[in-house]
Image (spheres, rainbow, N blue to C red):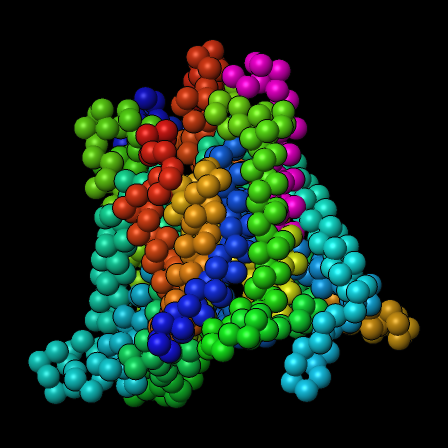
Amino acid sequence: MQTDIRMMPGRRSYVEEPADPQQTRNRILQATAMAIVLAYPFLDLFFGWQALLAFIPMMLMITLALGLNIVVGYAGLLDLGYAAFYAIGAYAAAFFTSPNSPLASVLPGSPFAWMQDFWVAMIMAVLVAGCAGALLGAPTLRLRGDYLALVTLGFGEIVPRLVKNLEPWTKGVKGMNPIGRPYLFGCQFGVDPCEILGMKLKLGMIPYYYLTLVVGAISIFAIIRLRNSRLGRAWAAIRDDEIAAQGMGINPVTTKLWAFSLGASFSGATGAIFGAYLQTISPDQFEYSTSVIVLCMVILGGTGNIWGVMLGGLLIQSFDRIFAERLTGWIHKAGALTGDPTITAAFNSFDLLKSRLLVFGLCLVLIMNLRPQGILPNRKRRETALTDLPEDDVAPDEAVMIAGAGASTEKSR
Amino acid sequence: MLTFEYFLQQLVTGLANGMLITLVAIGYTLVYGIVEMINFAHGDVFMLGAFSSVTTLQALGAQAVKRVANKDQPPIPETYLWLVIALITSMVFCATLNVLIERLAYRRLRRGSRMAPLISAIGVSFILQNFGIYWKGVSPVNFPRYIPQIDLVKAFGIDSFVRVTTKDVFVFVVTVPLVIALTLFIQRTKLGKAMRATAQDRDAAQLMGIDINRTIALTFLLGGALAGAAGLVSGLYNNTAGFQMGFSYGLNSFTAAVLGGIGNLNGAMLGGVFIGILAAMSDGYLDARWTPVVIFGTLNLVLIIRPSGILGQDLAERA
């Protein structure tokens, strides 16, 4: 397959290509975007946008979506209970670091006291979530796609309920708080004033912004490397044709298990940071709707394409955390401007935040029906996975046509 | 004998709830049998059915049951008429809604992978839930008591802790005939035959001159109608309706359908009654807050151990 050659790591073109103006422009664009992202907290302070607190959870959710993309996009497994792993990660970190956790009475003074450190707890959260993914995956990954989706849904329902019900350990619906904070140079995140090298600084939530940025960047890097690795190519093969992949010596169960486990471990890190950022976690943060919103982010942008997922995440999250509220505010103001009491009342009754489910639902239905590959489709798999025709439904002529279409697009590029 | 009577009491509640679950489960199983998709939005259609019933009944001016001296009085005769009208409205409303959903959100995806209609259905489910929020708000609304709760065991002069009320009987009076009618429809009529043929082999059925689109629409229509009936009955039985009831009831019903063997009508009934009783027992002997864990645990266990269900054929083979 031609696609495999392009996916090979370390591929270099044999001919030195002349500088392409398009490419230069892209480079400049990328550099500018990077600079804006890096400088954002200060721009935010300077211009008084006050969106920093919205951006941190936004970026965390996007990281979460990137993790889910491994499962849904790369391995082609529908996971409807992803929030469960996120919950497991968040609670694992809270267990180690929160003074209210049952471990808080055991750990200090014991040889395991070092586990109460945030960074250690975060790594533990990654491991615990990854193990949970493997534990759920092991008995279920033999199941067919839609049944697997249901098992994950069931799991996603069970976990928050267990958290709610096992009150002595998890504090039930009240949730766990406070949670240990990350720190650097002896300075705890989100605690002001902060003393570094004898200087007193007021940083607010800015350190969290950079922490999420770093974790996001590491995730992106790791995911790209994973995608191009032997394992990543095995995922693509399984997703596109499980039987053929098996014929080539790929073990579908272990391959899928890795996808499940690695996908879950990304949510573990995100959960740990989210918990520390909010300083409190409760079971209702991890319910079915969270799973679906993350899925929505993956599908809207483009399943299997990192940049697509990030775009989808950005769109959904900025709607959810910034625009829904502000648009509602603007509409209320517009209503007040008319001066007419009935119009004002009508405009005031409008609340986009009440239409969140509608927006997410419409998003899923429209994408599936009109552009199943998402806004930014993955070039390598235009006709596979979520959008593909199952083998047995394709007439031989059709199959040839599809293969032909794939080949012609390859050539034209 | 108190413990045994307590058990019997839970059994009665479980059976009544099981019949409701059966009605919804049939909708899942019919659709799965024919188009092999999990219609995630089905539970939410049921929820809107409950909402439409309460709206209809209130619009008709039906009067809630009066209590005199701590005893429910029999309703005035008009109430029966209003209930029948509400039942029909709810069934028609949900059937239309379900057919519309199929036409708009699923039909185009029929030939694609299994995942596409599933994701679309999740989207529809969210949309319907949001309509539910627009309609009745976020918190559950009170469904007035139109059916009196008169203990029949005492009425027959037997002194027992167990109560079988008119409400329980009402559930059976509505659900059992509907299930029988549906079974007869599928087994005896020409349209039913077309449905069975489509379920077996869509392409072959089409070659035999069966209009596939119409047959599938009919399946959604029947499923929707049953969900509408279940919506009314559940509202009357539980006296509450909220926008999230579709999700929880839907998952219970879906578990029932899978447990019985999805795609199998008898399986849906068996599973429905089983899940109803299981839920009642868990409510009674564990705690209501553990019931969802028990139900979802059952769902996962069934899917892992025997995905084809009790009465189903081995679906894994067909994958």
Residue placed farthest to the front in the image? Answer: B157
Looking at the image, the residue that sits furthest to the left is A111
Q: Tell me the quarter of the image containing the N terminus of chain A.
A: top left
Observer-nearest of B141 and A154? B141
> How many numbered badges does the structure rendering display?
0
Residue at image location 30% in from the left, 33% down from the top = A238
Across and down, in percent, residue B195 comes to 57, 29
Q: Is residue B224 magenta?
A: yes
User: Which is nearer the eye, A366 or B126?
Assistant: B126
x and y percentages locating residue B289 in the rendered image: 41, 72
Instruction: Kindly indicate the quadrant of the structure image that contains residue B20.
Output: bottom right
Tell me: residue A8, above or below residue B153: above
Magenta segment boundaries in residue numbering:
B204-228
Q: Is any part of residue B215 visible from this angle? A: yes
Q: Residue at x 47, y 11 (%)?
A: A397
The picture places residue B148, in percent across and down from the top left corner, at 66, 71
In the image, taking residue A108 as reference, residue B178 lies left or right, namely right
Residue located 45% across and 54% down the image? B273
